[in-house]
Amino acid sequence: MRKTKKKSDKKLKMENFFNILNFDLENDSKFSIFEVVIIIFISIVFGIIVGYVLTYTRSPLGSVKSNSKLSEIISTYNSIKDNYYKEIDDDTLVNAAVSGMIGSLDDKYSNYMDSSTTDSFNESVEGSFVGIGITIMYDGEYNKIIAVDGKGPSNKILKVDDLIVEVSGKDVRGIYGDDLKKLIRGKVGTTVKIKVLRNNKYLTFSIKRTNIEIETVKSNYFDVESKRIGYLDVDVISSNTYKQFNKNLKRLENKNIDSLIIDLRDNPGGHLSQTKEILSMFFNKKTVLYQLKDKDTKKKIYSSSNETRSYPIVILVNDGSASASEIITSCFMENYNNIKVVGTTTYGKGTVQQSHQLSTGTSIKYTVQEWLTSKGKSINEKGIKPDEELLMNSEYYSNPTYNTDNQLQKAIEILK
């Protein structure tokens, strides 16, 4: 069934993602302080982008040309280190310089990210994290477990409604968010002790941390008037989304579905490589899926397979559908023979970012390209208008069920 989000949750998710965690990315590398200065300076002055979208490779520093302005940056750094009247940390200076340069771009999708945000960003990109497989909610002075991953190491050990009291001997009452996450998470194979309060009894468990895969695609199907309609809900497009999409779609097709709903509502985008593979399940190699444009060139991105499908499809979108999810939507609208898009106009993010992780544990990302639809149209700051415009029933936000989801009901009505 449909993911359950309150309206305020959606707003927070979109603000966090677009201001901090947007990851339609090209590169992801670690550099020394000197290399960081060179990379950032070159990116701002020349805007030269090297490599192919979403391949995570080290940028070729050997090609960087010297520039007299670099000496001013290094001279300022040395002057502060040598003469400032208080001790100052190297990382603090570097992070401040990098943050200032990124801020000067005046681009809402170009951001400097601190180490905590970088960790969350990497988790979103990879689609997995190292942990014990629980979901918690801060409740008073305690952190309450509200879900336990059935495939995670906490399964059959911790239970929903357990209150976490200590982590590895540290009292965590009053600690929440990233501070608590850092205590619970660690390296694969290491053990963490969790003390919980359950039914007025204190219990302590030792749990081995493992790699937890984030579920980004969920599936369902509806039997309606002799029609079997498949349903795929895609939350975000991370590095494991194509694998999950393919697995869930094949499972639905094995149930002999007649048609399909792809739910991209509140999907903020993600990996372009994963987007290409998902689309390649529906379009042959002659099909242009989307285009990439920088200041000098324009490149057409074609399907990577001759696998096609022809059954009717409805795509659900809203103003939280952005970037890679807009690529999917536009490609179907321009190339698929039996498609309807239902919902409200999408977000309108038509740019691509490149990411670098710095040696300080922080990271940066900045815009390097604009993407265009398969027919060369820009949706940036415009969004995509659906075939069937339909506002969500306001009751859905307080009671998210099938009965209140009029957009999903409309999709089923079209397909039946």
Image (cartoon, grey):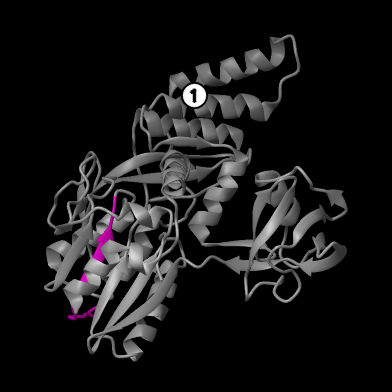
- Nearer to the camera, 85 or 143: 143
x then y, percent, for residue 399: 43, 59
* Relative horizontal placement of residue 297, taking residue 247 as reference (left or right): left
Q: Is residue 202 left or right of residue 136?
A: right
Q: Position of residue 53 (x, y in %)?
A: 35, 54
Residue 78: image location, x then y, percent = 64, 17
| Quadrant of the snapshot with the N terminus | bottom left
Q: Quadrant of the C terminus?
A: bottom left
What residue does disc 1 label? Answer: 100
Q: Main secondary structure of the magenta part?
A: loop
Which residue does the image show at 43% across and 63% down from the upper left? Answer: 3
Relative to 232, residue 33 above or below = above
Count residues near mark 1 (Cα–Cα under 10 Å), then give few for <14, some for 14-19, many for 20+: few
User: Residue at horizontal 57%, vertical 43%?
Assistant: 117
Q: Position of residue 201 (x, y in %)?
A: 87, 64
In the figure, 389 relative to 279: above or below? above
The residue lying toward the viewer, choosing from 70 and 331, is: 331
Looking at the rendered structure, the kind of residue marked 1 is: Gly
Residue 355 lies in the magenta stretch: no
Q: How many marks are shown on the rendered structure?
A: 1
- Name which quarter of the figure residue 306 lies in: bottom left
Q: Is residue 366 left or right of residue 151?
A: left
User: Residue drawn 61% across and 67% down?
Assistant: 212
| Secondary structure of the residue carrying numbered label 1 | helix
Front residue of this view, candidates 283 and 244: 244
Q: Quadrant of residue 398?
A: bottom left
**Residue 52 showing in the rendered view:** no
User: Is residue 316 shown to the viewer in this render?
Assistant: yes
Q: Is residue 350 above or below residue 82?
A: below
Residue range (magenta): 304-318
